[in-house]
Each structure stands twice: as structure tokens, then as C-alpha cells.
Amino acid sequence: MTTTRKLRRPAQIAVAGGAVLALSAGIAPAGAAALGAPAADRAPAAEAAAKKKPKFQMPFTCKSKMRLDTWGHSPALDIVKKGNPGSSGKAVVSSYKGKVVGTYYTKGSGNTIQIKHKNGWFTAYYHLKDKASKYVQKGDKVKRGKKIGRIGASGATTHAHLHYEQRYKKSGNWTDESHRRAVHFNGKKYTGQGNTWKSVTSKNC
């Protein structure tokens, strides 16, 4: 079983508009939109919803070895290839079957996709390399493992990585960062401020 290791808080630099990016080990976390959001994974609603949470898998092809970091915006994750080099352009796939409810661009999250899954659960994928609607479009139904984009550095970041979120909203077809919850892959929780998992193998097979 992979264990967590506490990291020293990364150095921070100011960027346009007062947003902050954290840089450490050559990996930049998500843009301004992701920082400072509430730690929603502790909300009582999340505990109840978790009982019906889909068995999400990593948003990468089977047996891919990836590094996961929470940095300063748990419960979201920043993900790169193990060791980081070669992350740019790596295929990003759907964590679970669902319906694409958003393909868009913002200055913070860059090229972004949001997918609605069952029981009120959603996933969000930030900083994609290509236009968000290149591989899927709003309204498309996708299977788990469907390629939806590629790791990139669009938006408010300088290093290629995937900023990934699992969200919960009881009803509706749209979520924002206030709906973020702790991330689970294959039933295991990956959360907590300043944590890292150097090598996690995708079981999205």
C-alpha cells in the first residue's frame, strides 16, 4: 500500500490579479481558481454521499504510474507522470462513465472539462493541452477510460499537469469548486493538505 508523506509547503510567487501559484519539484499546481476553496471533503453531506459514490479510477490509461499531490488546495489533486518528465501530451481519460456537461476555457483553469456521473457526482479536469471540445463535446456520453483530452499547461500555470477534482451536488447539472470532495481512486482516498503519493498505478482498465 502506498503511504503518504508530508511535504514542506512549496514556495509561492504572486501572479497577475493577485492569484498565487505554488512551484515545487518542477510541478505547478492549478491556477487561481483552484486556490483557497473550502475544504469541502469534511462536509457532512460528503459522508452521506460517499456511500453511493461511483468507483472512480485514475483519469489515465491502465497501468500508468502517476504522482499525486494535494499541495495547498486539498481535496483537489495535481497529477503528473511518475518522476514528472514527459507529462505534457499524455492522454487524460474519463474516471467513470457519465455525461459531459461542460467544455470551456477560463484564465485560471485553462481548457477544462466537467463530467456528470451517477448519484450527484461530477469530475473536473483542468489545464488540458488542447481545446476542451477537441475530443468530446458538451452532451456526449462517455464510458470509463474514454480519452477526453491531454495533459497540458493552459490557464494560470507554467508547468504541464492535470488538476483533477471529484465533486458532489445533490441535484443539478453543474458544479463549481465549492462542491469539491475528497478524491477516491479504486476505493482508496487521496486527500489532506500537503500530501504526496510518488507512484500510484492506474486501474482504469
Image (spheres, rainbow, N blue to C red):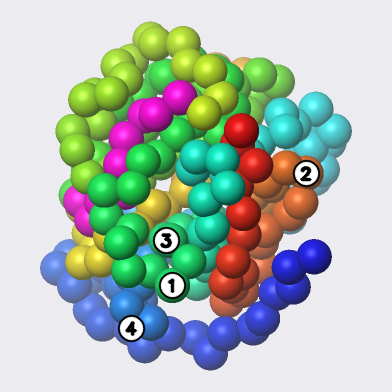
The residue carrying mark 1 is: 83
3D distance between C-alphas at marks 4 and 3: 19 Å
The residue carrying mark 4 is: 12
Sequence-earlier tag: 1 or 2: 1
Callout in the foreground (1, 3): 1
Type of amino acid at the residue the image marks with label 3: Val
Type of amino acid at the residue the image marks with label 2: Gly
Sequence-earlier tag: 1 or 4: 4
The residue carrying mark 2 is: 187
3D distance between C-alphas at marks 1 and 2: 24 Å
Type of amino acid at the residue the image marks with label 1: Gly
| Front residue of 98 and 12 | 98
User: Quick check: is 149 in the magenta stretch?
Assistant: yes
Callout in the foreground (1, 4): 1
The reply to whether residue 122 is in sight is no
The answer to whether the residues at label 4 and label 3 have Cβ atoms under 8 Å apart is no
Residue 1, given in percent of the width and then of the height, sits at 80, 65
Sequence-earlier tag: 2 or 4: 4
172 displayed left or right of 110:
right
Callout in the foreground (2, 4): 2
3D distance between C-alphas at marks 1 and 3: 8 Å
3D distance between C-alphas at marks 1 and 4: 21 Å
Q: Residue at x 79, y 37 (%)?
A: 50
User: Quick check: is 137 in the magenta stretch?
Assistant: no
- Give the extent of the magenta segment: 146-154
SS category of the residue bearing label 3 = strand
Callout in the foreground (4, 3): 3
Residue 147, given in percent of the width and then of the height, sits at 39, 29
The reply to whether residue 126 is in sight is yes
On screen, residue 41 above or below 158:
above
Residue 42, given in percent of the width and then of the height, sits at 73, 55
